[in-house]
Image: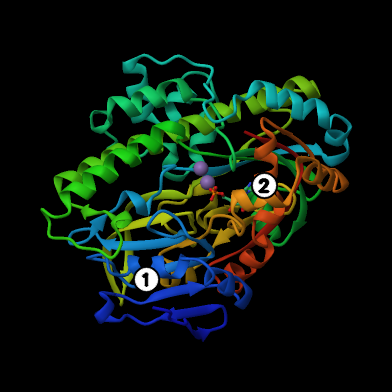
Amino acid sequence: TIVTPKKIGENQYQIDADSNLGMKVPVRIYANEGLLEKMLTDRTIMQARNVSSIPGIVGHSVVLPDGHEGYGFPVGGVAAMDAEEGMISPGGVGYDINCGVRLLRSNLTEDLVRSKLKDIVTDLFSSIPSGVGSKGAVKLSHSELDEVLVNGVNWAIDHGYGSTNDSDVCEENGQIKNADPNKVSDKARKRGAPQLGSLGSGNHFLEIQKVAEIHNQEAAEKMGIKEGTITVLVHCGSRGFGHQVCSDYLRVAEQAMSKYDISLPDRELACVPNTSEEGESYRKAMFAALNFAWSNRQMITHWTRKSFERVFNQSESDLDMKLVYDVAHNIAKVEKHKVNGKERKLVVHRKGATRAFPANRDEIPSKYRHLGQPVLVPGSMGTASWILLGQPNSMDLSFGSTAHGAGRTMSRSKARRNYTENDVKKSLNDKGIFIKALTRDGVVEETPQAYKDVDAVVDVSHNLGIATKVAKLVPIGVIKG
Ligand code: 5GP
Ligand code: MN
Ligand code: MN
């Protein structure tokens, strides 16, 4: 059935709950007309409607401005479930558990980095393992992998890949509690162990950027971001490890659903009660994957700093290569939210969605707490990316969340049909962007035209007071797996 979302305010659309369709709450979409129109061309909105029928869902099923269709749940979506009576779902987190982004700043200027752009991109490309089956530089024994899964970013820091200044500015300080390696299959371990410290492929990247615009001086200063200086954005997740955890627990959930009398419009929504044995096990395994990803991004950060030290012949501290923030965009965890004036504990599923908490939430690192949580929104290798700041309206509108990117608008196969490697490289080169990628298809599938307009996505978030602009970053060098 086709339903047209009704406009309920500027950049806000809703589909009312229809109990005949099993919907328990409305669907809320944050988008401008163009972004909404695009969403209506695929299954995005239908998927968000399906999500609204999951038992225990609270408030509304959220689609953010970068929303597009995904496995069961849309990417760019938020689903909050009552922690006692609601469900937890592997598909609501996604396959790449704790896929996320982190931003490093520096005091290097654009001119200086451009003068050695090929050197730095080449050095980064050779020192950071990338590609589909890429292996990291470390060999982990069974017990060492357990330590990674429990200690998260602190495993990497304890092994010389950074300092506690880094963990201070990660979501969950880069180490979520109550991860349990015993809930992880041998298959996940086998896939994951060799891959720690690798970027992966396709949409995962490392990007050298310049700070093009400052929109919030106070916040930019707190983050150490200055116009004209160079930043590095890293995007990757938990590799084959998280993928296998997701696969394993999708199967567990599919099999357990009848036992809990759950029936849903799409089997890809497979879920189990949050407090059930299966729910607990998934959460503990998923948390292990969160920790894997934080350790992974930390190792890549270390090698990035070493590359810059080599190429610019200065130390990491001279270069002021501090971590600004690290945030997950595929995650589910219990948080306190006010619903109709009453505080409740909810399992907030963010799939292709970034936490965007306003000032004074305890979860925000102390240096940023009075301002709001930094939010990182990548765009594409040929357009902008944004630093935002979480704002109060995010709590009522989107369970403290905003977009995680521009969002894909063109399939990988269509990109391959429409563009060649030379087209893409040439148009990047014309913009002064140097790319090194492992595969030809990787370049073509990631063409900037394959993504929506990140500035439009960010405007929606900004105008609604969900997360507001701090700085605009533009790429000058990119590594793609
Ligand atoms: P996802 O996690 O959904 O794969 O990707 C997150 C977002 O990253 C995408 O929606 C897209 O907007 C953005 N993105 C993909 N490739 C690049 C890139 O090379 N550079 C930047 N800055 N953003 C990218
Ligand atoms: Mn991602
Ligand atoms: Mn990913």
Q: Is residue 356 above or below residue 10?
A: above
Distance from Cα at disc 1 to Cα at disc 2: 31 Å
Q: Which mark is residue 416?
A: 2
> Would residue 302 appear left or right of 314 to someone viewing this image?
left
1 or 2: tag closer to the N-terminus: 1
Residue at 32%, 16% (x, y): give it.
142
**Which SS class for mark 2?**
helix
Give the left or right position of residue 443, taking residue 402 as reference: right
Closer to the camera, 440 or 481? Answer: 440
Place of residue 91 in the rendered image (x, y in percent of width and height, measured from the top left): 35, 51
For the residue marked with disc 2, what is the amino acid? Arg
Residue 306, percent from left and from top: 67, 22
Quarter of the image where the N terminus is located: bottom left
Q: State yes or no: discs 1 and 2 in contact (Cβ < 8 Å).
A: no
* Residue depicted at x 54% and y 24%: 134
Report whether the residue tagged 1 is closer than 8 Å to ligand 1: no
Answer with left or right where residue 193 lies relative to residue 306. left
What residue did someone put label 1 on? 49
Residue type at tag 1:
Arg
In front of the other: 53 or 347: 53
